[in-house]
Amino acid sequence: AMKSTTNNPPESAVRILKRATCSSLSGKSKLAYEVGLSDKKELQVRVISNTGGGCFNQDWVKLPAVEAAFDKVPAGEPVTSDTLRTMFRGMSQNTGGFTFAVLKHIAYVVPSATKKRCYDRVEPKAFRDEMAALIEGRAPPQADAKPKKNAGKKAAPVKTPSGPTKKTK
């Protein structure tokens, strides 16, 4: 049996805030993941399913631990799934890559402008705002919501012919 190094809380100690899906880093499969809040008020993520064939560990990964791993990378240097390798010792090699795909989806990282297959760390403000709303029981902000063009305008009445119409030559 593989030993977990993530020190997971019991299932009941995690409040599920969100379930979502994203592509794996390779784009060959879809991953389902959860974001949860521990009883110590720490945000965590975990991959719960994969449409591809790769095995992975379903343990919770604390986002403060991810941030600590990222902090070990010199400022301005890109990060990769290997940055998280020490967090997943003794687990399937896919676990780090799948977790990294989730981090990409929640905008903890964005593709590097300078290095292929590398990522730049960014402040995940939209994700943090969404989680704060969910924690407080509010509807999360809709980052992509755009007002409809005709919002607030009455629809023009549709004109219908009053009687049968004939085509004329």
Image: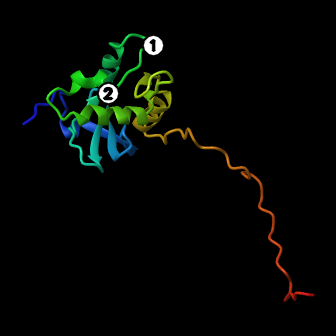
Residue 36 in the image: state x and y as whole percent.
Answer: 32, 36
Secondary structure of the residue carrying tag 2 is helix
Name the amino acid type tagged 1.
Gly
Q: Name the residue under label 1.
A: 76
Q: Which of marks 1 and 2 is nearer the N terminus?
A: 1
Judged left or right of residue 148, residue 7 is left
Q: In the rendered structure, which amino acid carries the disc numbered 2?
A: Ser
- Residue at the farthest top position: 74
Q: Tell me if 66 is positioned left or right of 105 in this view.
A: left
Would residue 130 be found to the left or right of residue 59 on screen? right
Q: Is residue 79 above or below residue 34?
A: above
Q: Is residue 60 visible?
A: no
Q: Which image quadrant: the C terminus?
A: bottom right
User: What numbered label is drawn on residue 24?
Assistant: none
The CA span between labels 1 and 2 is 16 Å
* Left or right of residue 7: residue 28: right
**Residue carrying label 2:** 81
Residue for point 45% across, 29% down: 128
Q: Where is residue 87 in the image (x, y as percent from the top left)?
A: 23, 24
Give the quarter of the image for residue 72: top left
